[in-house]
C-alpha cells in the first residue's frame, strides 16, 4: 500500500516537473519536495511523515530557488 502511494507521488512530481517556464522557486520546490519525500520513504517512515517531509522539503526548496533566482 505504501509503495503504491509513493509511486503515485513520484508520478505527480514527474508530471509537474515537466512543466515549462517554471521559475527558480518553483523548480526548487519540486526538487525539495521530491528529495524530502524520497528520503522519508526510504527510511521507512509512515505515510503522514512522508507527506510532511515532502511539504517541508518543498518549502525549503522554494525559498532556496527564489533566493538563487533573485541574484
Image (cartoon, helix red, strand yellow):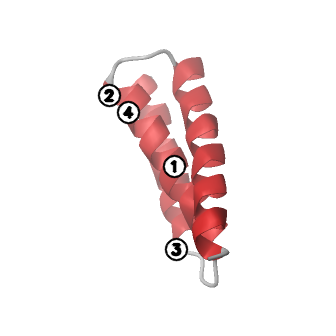
Residue in the foreground of this view, choosing between 24 and 20 = 24
Q: Quadrant of residue 12?
A: bottom right
Label located before the other in sequence (2 or 3): 3
What number is the disc on residue 43?
Answer: none
**Callouts 3 and 4 close, C-beta under 8 Å:** no
Residue located farthest toward the bottom when viewing the structure as drawn: 21
Label located before the other in sequence (3 or 4): 3
Query: Disc 1 to disc 2, how far (Cα)?
Result: 15 Å
Residue located farthest toward the front when viewing the structure as drawn: 71
What number is the disc on residue 42?
Answer: 2
Residue located farthest toward the left when viewing the structure as drawn: 42
The answer to whether any part of residue 23 appears in the image is no
Query: Disc 1 to disc 4, how far (Cα)?
Result: 11 Å
Residue at image x 53%, y 67%?
A: 17
Label located before the other in sequence (1 or 4): 1
Residue identified by numbered label 3: 18
Residue identified by numbered label 4: 39
Residue in the foreground of this view, choosing between 24 and 33 = 24
Quarter of the picture holding the N terminus: top left
Residue at image x 56%, y 66%?
A: 27
- Assess disc 3: are there few (<14), some (14-19) or many (≥20) residues with their C-alpha within 10 Å of its C-alpha: few
Residue at image x 62%, y 36%?
A: 56
**Callouts 4 and 2 close, C-beta under 8 Å:** yes
Amino acid at each position: 500500500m505504501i509503495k503504491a502511494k509513493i509511486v503515485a507521488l513520484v508520478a505527480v512530481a514527474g508530471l509537474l516537473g515537466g512543466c515549462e517556464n517554471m521559475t527558480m522557486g518553483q523548480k526548487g520546490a519540486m526538487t525539495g519536495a521530491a528529495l524530502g519525500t524520497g528520503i522519508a520513504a526510504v527510511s521507512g517512515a509512515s505515510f503522514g511523515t512522508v507527506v510532511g517531509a515532502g511539504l517541508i522539503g518543498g518549502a525549503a526548496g522554494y525559498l532556496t530557488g527564489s533566493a538563487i533566482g533573485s541574484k
